[in-house]
Amino acid sequence: MAASFSSAAIVVISSLLFPLFPSAYSSDFLSDITNSSVPKCDVNLLEFPLNLEYLEAEFFLYGALGHGLDKVAPELTMGGPPPIGAKKANLDPFTKDVILQFAFQEVGHLKAIKKTVKGFPRPQLDLSASSFARVVDHAIGLPLVPPFDPYANSINYLIASYIIPYVGLTGYVGANPKLEGAISKRLVAGLLGVESGQDAVIRGLLYAKALKKVIPYGMTVADFTNRISKLRNRLGHAGRKDEGLIVPKAWGAEGKVAGNVLAGDKFSVAFARTPEQILRIVYGSGNESIAGGFYPKGANGQIAKSHLRSG
């Protein structure tokens, strides 16, 4: 039963798993790397994820601390505009501790990518409550009353967090086989390891409350995650690459369980997405050439800008 798991147990289990993943920013990996070490054909694929890493860093930093990269690591923004509407969330101490760890992990990810490739400035991000409310309304199929506020409490914040790291995770899975350089592959493998861990913690914390109703909407946590996942599948236009916390048993591991604390295909292997599919989702438009959603002026980097120019 989902509710039988405690939050503390989930994080303890996750902490035991983290050492199994390669570190994305460790002295033995990146200390001697220069931009020239990366094949030219890999650069755009390595830079594109900065869009998601900026979003995650700002959302987690603001949620835990009430301020973002401009105070914590202003050099990483490269002069990009501050996020719109981000603010400190009303989190319980345990959730705040977890989110703060995520926040500084994202700072490390930005440093790791920018030490490997040149990168680009932080794009304009819309992290306002209304931005998240639009995503949730789209997923539910009608405007919630009152509007969904990701910063109101821990449950809402974790549901909002469900929207973010998993999309980046699938992007890393999709990018890895397209990379040619060993350094590029090592970096993406390391980033994927930690992003997967974050997603596992978020899903685990939500799974522990899967059958709990989200006040005042009368829908369960599982309902929210299932509908958000269905929305991302619709926007991505690439079939089922996203699953909520409780699924038809045929979709569960080996077709034997409905609980779905980790999403995967019929072999329990992580789903992959292309940059185009990711843009369709984070723009909320279902079209990589139509900016919006969390990126009102579009994402940055060669891949994203090439689609905006063609739109």
Image: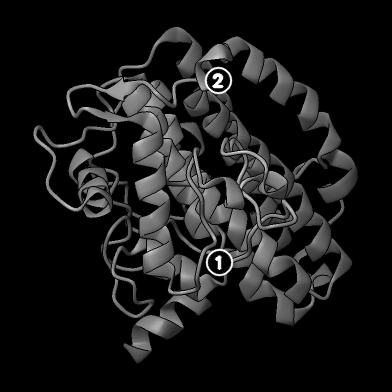
Task: Determine whether, in the image, residue 52 is placed left or right of residue 283.
Answer: right
Q: Position of residue 12 (x, y in %)?
A: 70, 16
Above or below for 101 versus 167: above
* Callout in the foreground (2, 1): 2
Q: Nearer the viewer, residue 144 or 254?
A: 254
Which residue type does callout 2 highlight? Met
According to the image, label 2 marks what residue? 1
- Disc 1 on helix, strand or loop? loop
Residue placed farthest to the bottom in the image?
A: 310
Question: Disc 2 on helix, strand or loop?
Answer: loop
Nearer the observer, 144 or 105: 144
Q: Residue at x 40, y 11 (%)?
A: 92
**Residue 269 left/right relative to 216:** right
Residue beneath the point at 69% across and 57% down:
266
Quarter of the picture holding the C terminus: bottom left
Where is 179 relative to 307, above or below? above
Tell me which colouring the rendered structure shows.
one colour
In this picture, is 62 found above or below 98?
Answer: below
Q: Position of residue 158 (x, y in %)?
A: 41, 30
Asked where in the image residue 24 lies, by quadrant, the reply is: top right
Q: What numbered label is drawn on residue 276?
A: none
Q: Quadrant of residue 91?
A: top left
Residue occupying image coordinates x 83% and y 42%: 22
The answer to which image quadrant residue 209 occupies is top left
How far from the left and from the top, in percent, is residue 197? 67, 36
Q: Quadrant of the N terminus?
A: top right
Q: Nearer the viewer, residue 309 or 3?
A: 3
Q: Nearer the viewer, residue 117 or 45?
A: 45
Q: Which residue is mark 1?
A: 48
Residue found at the very far left of the displayed protein: 145
Mark 2 neighbour density, 10 Å: few (under 14) some (14–19) many (20 or more)? few
Please tell me which of labels 2 and 1 falls first in the chain. 2
